[in-house]
Image: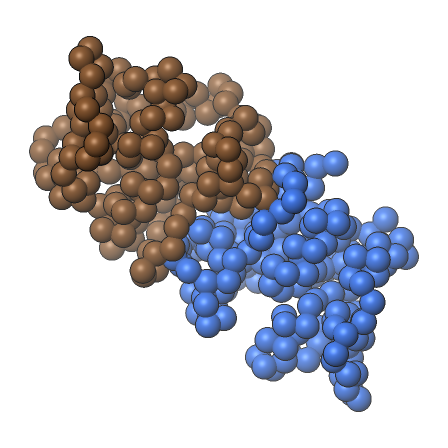
Chain colours: A blue, B brown
Amino acid sequence: MRLVTFGLANSLDNFIARSDHGTDWLVWDNEVAAISGEYWQTIDTVVMGRKTYEVAVKLGTTSYPGAKNYVFSRTLQPKPGVDVEIVAEDPVAFLRALKQQPGKGICVLGGGELAHTLLQADVIDEIGLNIQPVLLGSGIPLFHALAKQINLELLECRPLKSGSVYVRYRIAR
Amino acid sequence: MRLVTFGLANSLDNFIARSDHGTDWLVWDNEVAAISGEYWQTIDTVVMGRKTYEVAVKLGTTSYPGAKNYVFSRTLQPKPGVDVEIVAEDPVAFLRALKQQPGKGICVLGGGELAHTLLQADVIDEIGLNIQPVLLGSGIPLFHALAKQINLELLECRPLKSGSVYVRYRIAR
């Protein structure tokens, strides 16, 4: 079964962006690039929600090359020449089916909303965080309220030179 | 100047207790005891808010022996035989003065409210967290909204056998 992973960078107080979606506080350096590059080798599929996709497009990324791109939306229309498949069906059912197909890992990209739905439905297998050394004080939260506790197993914990902490967890079942 | 430190255990989604104040999910083992024991050697003073104090009393702890105990409250009355000093004045002014006096480190104990006030006023020097491998999903939050971003420097990062991650940060100034 394919591994579904959710990972991103967050502040120590668990924000993924400022209230205005600003991510100027994120450190991107060689160490992060290496971790990201290694991770990218393990996946061949990227799924994201509409909001994340629209932010990516604004920032100039219409799709992630080398991976099959799915965007969940009931309203978006496919654009010619853009290598993204719009999925109007329920993300949970879609991901459950996708996990059964042959292939490499599946990356859940972006903000907390899609990840939250998939976490609640127990579709996500691993969480990776790059905890930045900052308290933002306000912003867009990483984790939303869950109906029940989710136990984790620490797979990896690595301090980075920038002062960030890279942690990777398996969802305990 | 004496170091003011704030430390506790939190869930990965940044709760310090369940909504009913439950902390059954916290792992206490030899490693945590060793870290706690080492830390205890560096301080001689404990300060806490009224709510934290009342929880401690309920759990059977009326004071922390070996340290000077201060509880901030405008309503609590001192109890004979209880080695705790009730401080009715503003915690920020009190702590600023206390930092100037000779002595070992000062520990800000307990929930987020007093720590939040002291963080905002730039009175806290270090934060230590024992991040437990769990998403609680709801509960009493560790960090509250801050008026401005606080930058941190990672001093220490250590994965524990239990799957917790011990991190220690200096407030960057």
For the C terminus of chain B, give its image quadrant: bottom left
Q: Residue furthest top?
A: B81
| Side (left or right) of A132 relative to A123 | left
Is residue B44 among what the camera can see?
A: no
Residue at (66% x, 63% y) in the render: A109
| Side (left or right) of B42 relative to B103 | right
In the depicted structure, whether residue B154 falls above or below residue B102 = below
Q: Nearer the viewer, residue A127 or A120?
A: A120
Residue at (89% x, 53% y) in the render: A100
Q: Residue furthest right?
A: A101
Q: Residue furthest bottom?
A: A80
Q: Quadrant of residue B56?
A: top left
Indicate the position of residue B101 as horizontal and vertical percent values. 9, 33
Residue at (46% x, 68% y) in the render: A19
For the N terminus of chain B, give its image quadrant: top left
Indicate the position of residue B153 as horizontal and vertical percent values. 35, 50
Residue at (19% x, 35% y) in the render: B74
In the depicted structure, whether residue A148 falls above or below residue A92 = above
Is residue B144 among what the camera can see?
A: yes
Q: Nearer the viewer, residue A112 or B20?
A: B20
Indicate the position of residue B86 as horizontal and vertical percent values. 18, 27
Indicate the position of residue A70 as horizontal and vertical percent values. 77, 70
